[in-house]
Image (spheres, helix red, strand yellow):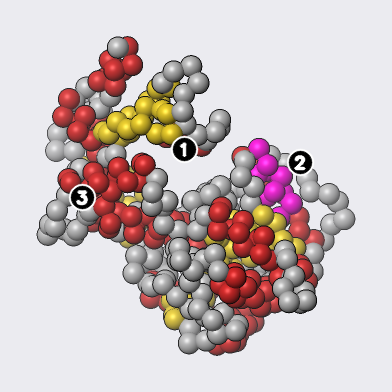
């Protein structure tokens, strides 16, 4: 009974908010499952349960309305990934008086090269959809594309996969020699030192130190293989030589059969219908989660006004719709992989001459023991803003 009393206190004292929560039974995950951290309440059933009773909040309007109820002068939301703002505003449950989407501080025409690569070097389709991503042909074509891009991209190169599962399957394939030929893994190492994002937070700091050391102390730089919505794709500052290119290998949709994803989609489809401001339903939200994860990842490439780099969308399903406004007009769909590498080579030749930063000095020392806060800053790159003004603000 004490558990259910606690559930009823959620929703900031508003009984109507209980309709924005869902209670579900979830199979017990292994200890340390990071997804459990997002649950409002998790109740174990039995001494050694195989199921967990979950009580999930499915609407950010609960928290936003609690803030508005305190009558602040203003509420300001800022981020580089608020777009599309219309559906975000509908989810928040309040009307914003001002919506602002800024251009970037750089000149994208000269400092960014962005392209959609629908085929690899063997002219086979790059498509990481569920039915194709586990095929040997796809993994070989993607690996070959990364090998060729590693030859062109200077210094650091970030490669993002849709999930850990997709990344690990590709790595297993690439480490094996095919038909007596050299493995893709060995071919990659000819052009870049390769570092892989770990699953645990404890190993992340050492991985980042290793990557930056390899970028700054090897002739051809390094490649960091990571995952969208993972630890590397958000907040970490890969400026200048640490990220001269960001490669997206597929559309990072959330796990379709995940109970929380299913519940969220069902809630939105039941709550919202078509309106004059746009459409928000479960399928729209599902697609937007992939787009926002893409925008978060491509934000790693430009970190200050003199930075430059390339954005490579290596999946034929990519389109410009939903991409951040600053990059959207500058994305071109390549007719062939050869066209992409030729244009990319030309871009780096021009940009490195005009916007080159001082090269890091080579060092024989081992990676330092600096803390992440010292070594990996958080750049202030806000490009979108929503402003709510209270009709009856409190006296300050």
Closer to the camera, 270 or 152? Answer: 270
**Which residue, given by chain and number where applicable, does mark 3 sit on?**
269
Vertical placement of residue 78 versus 327, above or below: above
Horizontal and vertical percent for residue 266? 25, 46
Closer to the camera, 353 or 80? Answer: 80
From the viewer's perspective, tell me whether residue 133 is left or right of residue 295.
Answer: right
Tell me, yes or no, whether the highlighted magenta stretch contains residue 55: no
**What SS does tag 3 mark?**
helix
Q: Residue at x 44, y 80 (%)?
A: 332
**Which residue, given by chain and number where applicable, does mark 2 sit on?**
369
Distance CA(mark 3)–CA(mark 1): 23 Å
Q: Residue at x 28, y 57 (%)?
A: 283
What mark, if any, has residue 35 been given in the picture?
1
Query: Label 3: few (<14), some or many (≥20) within 10 Å?
Result: some
From the viewer's perspective, tell me whether residue 101 is left or right of residue 118.
Answer: left
Taking the image as drawn, is residue 341 in sight?
no
Q: Which residues are magenta?
A: 202-211
Q: Residue at x 55, y 69 (%)?
A: 135
């Amino acid at each position: 009974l004490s558990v259910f009393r606690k559930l009823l206190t959620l929703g900031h004292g508003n009984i109507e908010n209980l309709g924005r929560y869902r209670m579900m039974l979830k199979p017990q995950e292994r200890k340390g499952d990071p997804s459990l951290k997002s649950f409002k309440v998790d109740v174990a059933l039995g001494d050694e349960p195989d199921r967990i009773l979950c009580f999930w909040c499915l609407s950010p309007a609960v928290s936003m309305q609690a803030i508005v109820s305190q009558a602040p002068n203003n509420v300001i939301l800022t981020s580089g990934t608020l777009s599309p703002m219309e559906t975000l505003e509908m989810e928040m449950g309040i009307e914003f008086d001002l919506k602002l989407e800024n251009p970037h501080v750089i000149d994208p025409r000269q400092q960014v090269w962005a392209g959609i690569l629908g085929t690899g070097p063997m002219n086979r389709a790059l498509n990481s959809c569920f039915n194709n991503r586990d095929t040997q042909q796809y993994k070989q074509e993607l690996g070959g594309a990364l090998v060729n891009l590693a030859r062109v991209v200077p210094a650091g190169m970030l490669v993002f996969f849709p999930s850990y599962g997709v990344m690990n399957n590709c790595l297993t394939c690439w480490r094996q020699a095919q038909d007596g030929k050299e493995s893709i893994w060995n071919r990659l190492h000819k052009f870049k030192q390769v570092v892989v994002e770990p699953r645990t937070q404890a190993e992340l700091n050492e991985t980042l130190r290793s990557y930056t050391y390899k970028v700054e102390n090897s002739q051809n730089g390094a490649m960091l293989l990571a995952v969208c919505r993972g630890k590397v794709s958000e907040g970490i500052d890969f400026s200048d030589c640490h990220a001269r290119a960001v490669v997206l290998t597929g559309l990072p949709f959330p796990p379709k059969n995940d109970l929380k994803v299913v519940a969220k989609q069902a809630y939105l489809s039941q709550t919202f219908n078509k309106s004059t401001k746009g459409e928000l339903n479960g399928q729209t939200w599902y697609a937007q989660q992939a787009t926002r994860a893409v925008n978060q990842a491509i934000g790693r490439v430009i970190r200050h006004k003199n930075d430059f780099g390339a954005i490579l969308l290596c999946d034929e399903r990519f389109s410009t719709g939903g991409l951040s406004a600053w990059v959207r007009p500058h994305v071109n769909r390549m007719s062939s992989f050869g066209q992409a590498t030729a244009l990319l080579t030309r871009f780096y030749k021009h940009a490195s001459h005009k916007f080159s930063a001082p090269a890091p000095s080579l060092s024989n020392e081992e990676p330092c023991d600096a803390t992440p806060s010292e070594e990996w800053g958080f750049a202030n790159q806000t490009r979108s803003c929503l402003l709510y003004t209270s009709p009856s603000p409190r006296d300050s």
